[in-house]
Image (spheres, rainbow, N blue to C red):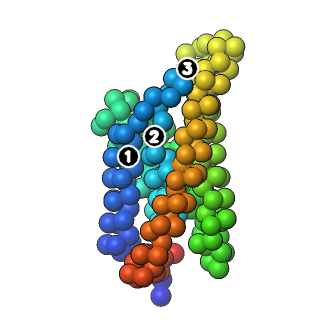
Amino acid sequence: MKKNNLSVLNITFMAMMAAMVYVVTLFRFPLLGSKVHFANAVCLLSGLLLGPLQGGLAAGIGSALYDALAGGYDFVNVMITLVSKFAMAWVCGMIARAPAEHRDRADRTVLACVCGALTYVALYMLKTFIYQKLVYGFPMDAVWATMWAKLIPSLINAAAAVIAAPLFYHAVLPALKASGILREMRAEE
């Protein structure tokens, strides 16, 4: 039987995953002129655990809250983060949820994470291009140099997320299945 409303369990998991995204983003370290963190892995984990819509909301809201409260970003950047992190978890969740009989296979999980992470990298590069060229008006050689400098750490973050998220997912999957929580959460799909 399909329910029309979100259950308390799903809302609680969404809030917990958004909080985890926020907290994990606080712990970052510099690398190649950027900051590396595992927030993207938790965003992908949100998509894997909660599906495209709820996982996307958890990832987007958690990341946007970080930008607004701890990151010191303006409203426009907060909204860009909300959309791009939502898109990352949404793509991951969509690919992970396709045919139910293959849902929790490791190869499907990794593919979903790769596609989600690359979606975020593409959106981040698009944002960088728009800001550098259209907002700031830098010449194209400076724009490409900035994009190249940001691409390397972005790909490192993506690779770390693609390695970590499936490991986390498959580590918690048996407990979620045994407790019946996963079945309860997926009953609403």
Q: Residues within 10 Å of mark 3 (few under 14, many from 20)?
A: few
Ranked by sequence position, the earlier of labels 2 and 1 is: 1
* Local SS, label 2: loop
* Local SS, label 3: helix
Query: In the figure, 3 relative to 96: above or below?
Result: below
Residue, disc 3: 135
Q: Residues within 10 Å of mark 2 (few under 14, many from 20)?
A: some
Residue 139 image position (x, y, % from top left): 66, 11
Marks 2/1 in contact by CB < 8 Å: the verdict is yes
Ranked by sequence position, the earlier of labels 3 and 1 is: 1
Residue at image coords 35%, 43%: 65
Residue 167 image position (x, y, % from top left): 52, 60
Q: Residues within 10 Å of mark 1 (few under 14, many from 20)?
A: some
Looking at the rendered structure, the number of numbered marks drawn on it comes to 3
Q: Amino acid at mark 1?
A: Val
Residue at image coords 31%, 35%: 70
Residue, disc 2: 37
Residue, disc 1: 24
Residue at image coords 38%, 46%: 24
Q: Amino acid at mark 2?
A: His
Residue at image coords 45%, 28%: 30
Marks 3/2 in contact by CB < 8 Å: the verdict is no
Q: Find the residue positioned furthest to the bottom.
A: 1
Give the Cα distance between marks 3 and 1. 30 Å
Frontmost residue, 34 versus 118: 34
Frontmost residue, 105 versus 85: 105
Specify the label residue 5 is tagged with: none
Residue 142 visible in the displayed image: yes
Marks 3/1 in contact by CB < 8 Å: the verdict is no
